[in-house]
Amino acid sequence: MKIVVNPHGPYRVVGGVPLAVQTIEPNSRKESWEWREGRSFPASAEYYLCRCGQSENKPFCDNSHLKVGFVGNETASRRPVERQSEHLDGPTHVLSDAENLCAFARFCDPGGKIWSLIEHTDQPNIRDLVIREASHCPAGRLVLRDKATGEVVEPNLPPSIGLVEDTALRCSGPLWVRGGIRVESSDGTPYEVRNRQTLCRCGASTNMPFCNGSHASIRFQDGLR
């Protein structure tokens, strides 16, 4: 399974990668709280996903990138995400934060922002909340490491692609790439393989091919809800 970034064009998805809508469900306070899987699409051996945000056949490409003159230069850093991150040391865990990868899903907010909560992970209830908030981050911006074992705390995600829908903001979000699927640059160079990452599909990110939350500011709509 892999995803190839076509220059100024769509993502070529190879290997029969499952594809389904993944909706951010808010709690009673309208904070991002849970993921809900929705409509799924046939997982053909190869398919092309829109990257410019203009397709009339979303999530698939219909060559609209050619009509609109889409410029999708890849600008993201090739450094390992660990080296792009700020590290916050808590009693039981270290939080790594690669802010440039933020997909604005806001799972880091309920119960107190994770950057404050990390200082209190010696309290079991807060530790559980910190683990929950970091693990629900689709972009892998937030990663926890257990100080006792040295192991990274990661959710068990099947190899698949999620089409993010944001209920609270009433907009569509990025492609949620899960389970260690390889993402390959248009020049053939692979990006770091990760359990969680998000790819831009609104065409407005300044950190291509990754999402930087621009879909929220432009209120991107894919029509799949």
Image: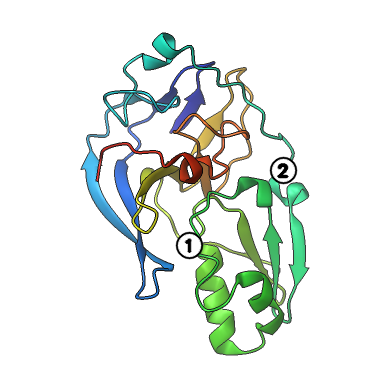
* Image side of residue 64 versus residue 99, left or right: left
Is label 2 in a helix, a strand or a loop? Answer: loop
- The residue at the point 68 percent across, 84 percent down is 120
Q: Eyeballing the image, is 45 above or below 34? A: above
Q: Residue 165: which numbered mark, if any?
A: none
**Residue named by callout 2:** 80
- The amino acid on which the numbered mark 1 sits, given as a three-letter code, is His
**Of pointers 2 and 1, the one earlier in the residue sequence:** 2
Q: Which image quarter: residue 221?
A: top left
Q: Is residue 131 above or below residue 101?
A: below
Q: Quadrant of the N terminus?
A: top left
Q: Decide if residue 153 is on the left or right side of residue 203.
A: right
Mark 1 nearby-residue class (10 Å; few <14, some 14–19, many ≥20):
many
User: What is the x, y in percent for residue 202?
Assistant: 45, 33
Q: Which mark is residue 136?
A: 1
Q: Secondary structure at mark 1?
A: loop
Query: Tag 2: residue type?
Result: Pro
Where residue 205 sits in the image (x, y, percent)? 56, 34
Q: Residue at x 41, y 45 (%)?
A: 159
Mark pair 2, 1: CA separation: 21 Å
Q: Does 71 sit above or below residue 22?
A: above
* Residue 109 image position (x, y, % from top left): 54, 69
